[in-house]
Amino acid sequence: MVHVTLLAPAVNAALRQVRFDDAPPDAAAVRRARSAAGALPHHDVTFTAPSARCRGTAEALALDAAVAPGLRDLDVGRWRGRSLDEVGREAPGDVAAWLADPAAAPHGGETLLELIERTGAWLESRAGQDGRVLAVAEPAVIRAALVHALDLPPLTFWRLDVVPLTATALSGRLGRWNLRCGEPLTAPE
């Protein structure tokens, strides 16, 4: 049986502004991550998504993490660098379509269904192995993993909140996963 713990990265300005952007965690978030490093669950292998925020979080946690391209964030195409508010003001119909139809990609990037499929493939590639995996991944990837693992309707993706520096644990074998969600990383007392 494999145990996969998905760790949400530390916060940055883009996350606070709901901006489709990749930036490293800010200084305060790095300090919080460093203080939480002692609370990481036991792991045999460690991965990180390729984003600056995930790599910066992995570094702050002192993890020797391999970059896993399958954990990359949702590709939002031409919306990259813009905030959800900006896009919503300029193209409210596009945002509404994106939120209502998991097969829609009005931004020209990846659909929600494609993200769920890609993330599910990464997760299932771990399922044939034993051991404990720790992966720092963007909130969208964690939500996609949960939708896949629990065989949830794709639109459930939008109803799942992933808090920075929390661990979401999945355990199981190929095609069958169990969930333990939302464990905060706090140093043991």
Image (cartoon, rainbow, N blue to C red):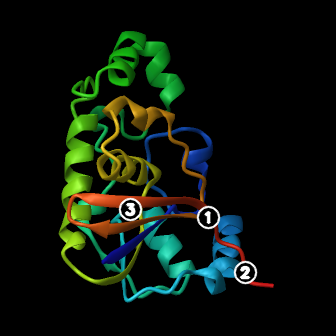
Query: Which residue was labeled with disc 2?
Result: 187
Q: How far apart are marks 2 and 3 (CA)?
A: 25 Å
Secondary structure of the residue carrying tag 1 is: strand
- How far separated are the C-alphas under marks 1 and 3? 22 Å
Query: Which amino acid, by three-letter code, is at mark 3?
Result: Ser
- Judge the density around disc 3: few (<14), some (14-19), many (≥20) Cα neighbours within 10 Å: many
Select label 2 or label 3 by which is in front. 2
Q: Observer-nearest residue: 64 or 120?
A: 120
- Residue 63, percent from left and from top: 47, 85
Tell me if mark 2 has few (under 14), some (14-19) or many (20+) residues whose alpha carbon lies within 10 angstroms of its own: few
Q: In this view, does 124 lie to the left or right of 18?
A: left
Which of pointers 2 and 3 lies earlier in the amino acid sequence?
A: 3
Residue under the point 47% across and 18% down? 88
Regarding residue 131, the answer to whether it shows in the image is: yes
Of label 1 and label 3, which has the lower sequence position? 3
Q: Would you name the residue on which mark 1 appears?
A: 183
Any mark on residue 83, and which?
A: none
Give the residue type that dot 2 points to.
Ala
